[in-house]
Amino acid sequence: MIILSVYDGVSIEFLRLSSPVEQLLEHTGDDCLCGQCGNVSPPCPTFLCRFPSLCDTQSTTGMRRTPLRPPPGLSRLSQEITFDDRDSETELPQISRQIPAPKSDPSFDYKQAYGNAEDVDMPLLPSNFPQTVRFPLTENVDPDTRSSASRSWNGQRQSQPEYTYSSIVLEGHATPQRQPNSSSAVAHCSVAPKFLKTPTSTGYALGSRFPRTPKQHPFAKSFEVPQWRKLAIHILLCALAYPFLLVFVVTSRGKSLFWARLFVGAGCGLLGFMMGSSLLRLARGILEAAAWATVIHQSRVPDSQGSGVRLKDLAAHSDDPTSSIPAFRLIWDRHSYPGADRDYRKFYDTRQWSLWIAFFLANVLLAGTLTFILARVVDIDVDIVHQHQTYYEVAVSADLSDADIKRAQDLQNAFQSDALAWTLVPFSLESSLPSVVSLSWNNDSVYFSEVTLSQLIPGGSGFGTFQTGTTSPSLGLEPQDLMQAVSSNSVEPGSILRFPRWGIRIKCAKIPDIPNNIIPLSENNLTYLFTPRDTIRGLFQNFEMDFPQVFEVPLNFTLVMHANDTVPSGFDPSGIATGAMFWDSGVAHSTNSTPLSLGEDGNGFVTMENVLVRLNTSFAPHGSFGVIGNFSLPDGDGYLTFIGYDAAVCLELYEPWVLEVYNSSVGSPTSMRIVDKAASIKDMNTQLIKEKIKGRPLDDPLTKRALNSTNLKAAFIIAHHNSVNQMLKDNGRNANYMPSPSLISFTGGDGPYGYTSLSEVDYAKSRALADASNVLPYLAGSGLSVGRRFPDKVITTTAINDLGMAILIVVVFLMGLVSALFVPRLPLDMPRRGFDLYSWVSAFYAQELVAEAPGGISKNMELEDLADLAGDLKFRYVGG
């Protein structure tokens, strides 16, 4: 390749005329390279003497391997002609250039004109190598000149200098030189030229090619060629962003909160990293263009105003092209450099580069926050899911200890006295009793007393301690002590507890044929109630229980009726199973309980109870009774009133049940469901669920694994009488058979005059609620039972916010699109440069960036020392 470069002013440069240096040396010798051209024999070809000093006196070979700079003050290439020896035939066009003398050269007369250098057409045929190439040269003298002096090209005038070559690398430049008025044919060359001893196949030969013509694109005038490949990758990432993140979101569903956060975080992190990296790769060109534009701007400042950019500033701008720090530094430096001021550069570059740097910073900000924003568009909802697979064994206060039973035995006599009608809870603390829970089991309603928090904490207890002056498990604890006990509870909130508890089932039936089965008032002012055997049998059949043999034998009336009291005539005693006697007490409702089992078999308690309703008819205007008494009573106004009678019989069972209780830190324990009708816990395995214990089983001998009623007789009697007496206290006053709220609840009516008719269903419910509230709490004291704790699983439901995700993808796409298509061109239409290695090779090898060489730089220097030495060195851009 041959390149002829004509520089503004004085310089013509021949660059890299391809041919091996060795072949040239065979014709010329070393003296022609670095000696006196006129003192060699044979004489040096005039062609070689056309160049100034190119020799490097410090080189042993006389060769110079670095490209030569243009002459001082010459930077803009005026005309370039390139022809390639790969073409079958290339013609060198006519070139004619008037070359004035530099004003700084005192050896020239400014009025003297110089001749033109002409290169005529010259065909190059690669197939004919080696060949002789002739360079015709004609020199003309300006007709206006007064002197006959003529201009020469550093050598003897001749019309047809020639040499033979096949490939030579020759670097140099020619400058005009004043010649004496002589036509001497001796070549004059003050110094010999230097040659670059480098083969064409090496990378150094690439510098001989001029930049390619910029590719055409829709924005070619003001912007660089778009980064199509990077843009395609960015578009692909934006298109795949939603399905990519959806994979992680779907994977995280149903997992625990930890794993859901891990999967969502990983997906958002990876997607944010990829899309952010794509954004930064596209936006990098903007920062590079702004940095190089700053160098060009400052390079056009006169030396007196600090021309050039310091090396340490250039290093700071290019240190990390994907970070915001170099961008902020560049903005600051542009305000410091006078050449970057818009007023200074308004004649050749009016663009607002600071706005482009701000746009780059917007890309950096978006790329840095993408992961955070993506995490915000993924909604994670937490659900508490109960699980029945893994459990721990814990101790709960659900039984009576030996100390509790002993205290109950000491109180038994007081509760069996009808004269006292004693209760365990004073009226002021009745509200502190636990609530009642009704759960279904095989079409039956089973009633339980709710578990209290004090039963689940270490050292706590239920109500069944029977301690004097202590009627609530929390009375002995201060509020702060209770909260502290809860916080250190071994039974952690947020779990299902499974353990056995006592429950109640009850069935009731109205006494049939009331006129024949009730004696309203006997000779001794007593009321007698008789229950037919068939009525009782039906109750046992409802519970699928065997009918007790004691009810099969005829009733012994002498054991039931008071002396001198007899049954009415026509009464058939053969069908009667039980009888009950009631005093004329004036109480509207009275009960008579017969214990069928006091827990001796360990399976619980069974009672049969008769309820007798005696109500003054004046308080029941809409009432219906089984029979009206014959005796009248005057009311407050003196009018005669009568007493209405009705009755029912109930069978009540106290049984052990295994229940599940949910215990959490946000409220009191709550009974959830009945697991089994049993006194102890067993595995409830299914085909899908297999229960498995975690940790060690409890081995404390004081902790019971099953409920047993064998030793609970005294406690049950006290609790049962406590419930009956609580209901009796609801009567208000013991006179005139006035209604009470409890009595009205037996009918389903409302208000003090709302009595309608005794309902066995409503009475069974009311009785069960009363006993569950006043009996069952006292069957759980300080005794410990084994329970199973099933910790909750916290699982998540994750979903992508479609609107937010769509907006984010569009923003990222548009930012990348702008960064790819609109990278500003460098000022003065300079070729694109960046911070990559190729740009630095071009900048320093081709001497686009020049600076005065600092002293003291040597091999193997530490980077810190080099930065201190050369940091303030200023570089100027002279590539154009």
Image (spheres, rainbow, N blue to C red):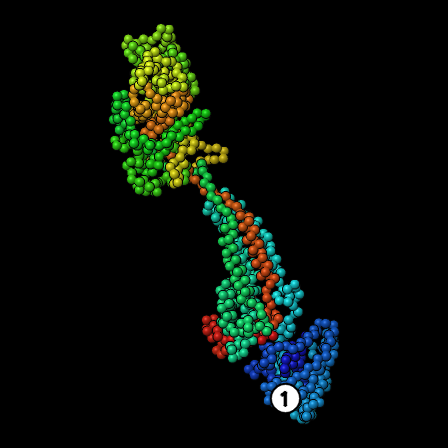
- Give the camera-side residue of 351 and 622: 622
Most extreme residue toward the front is 637
The residue to which callout 1 is attached is: 110
Residue 699 point in image, percent of width and height: 34, 35
Residue located 54% across and 58% down the image: 277
Residue 420 point in image, percent of width and height: 26, 23
- Give the camera-side residue of 749 and 385: 749
Left or right for 607, reference 25? left
Residue located 29% across and 32% down the image: 428
Mark 1: amino acid = Tyr
Residue located 52% across and 57% down the image: 366
Is residue 478 visible from the viewing direction of this image? yes
Specify the quadrant of the image occupied by residue 603: top left
Most extreme residue toward the top is 569
Specify the quadrant of the image occupied by residue 593: top left
Is residue 399 visible from the viewing direction of this image? no
- Give the camera-side residue of 403 and 760: 760
* The N terminus lies in quadrant: bottom right
Q: Is residue 390 above or below residue 136?
A: above
Residue 492 point in image, percent of width and height: 38, 40
Residue 730 point in image, percent of width and height: 32, 25
Q: Element type at marker 1?
A: loop
Q: Is residue 22 above or below residue 812?
A: below
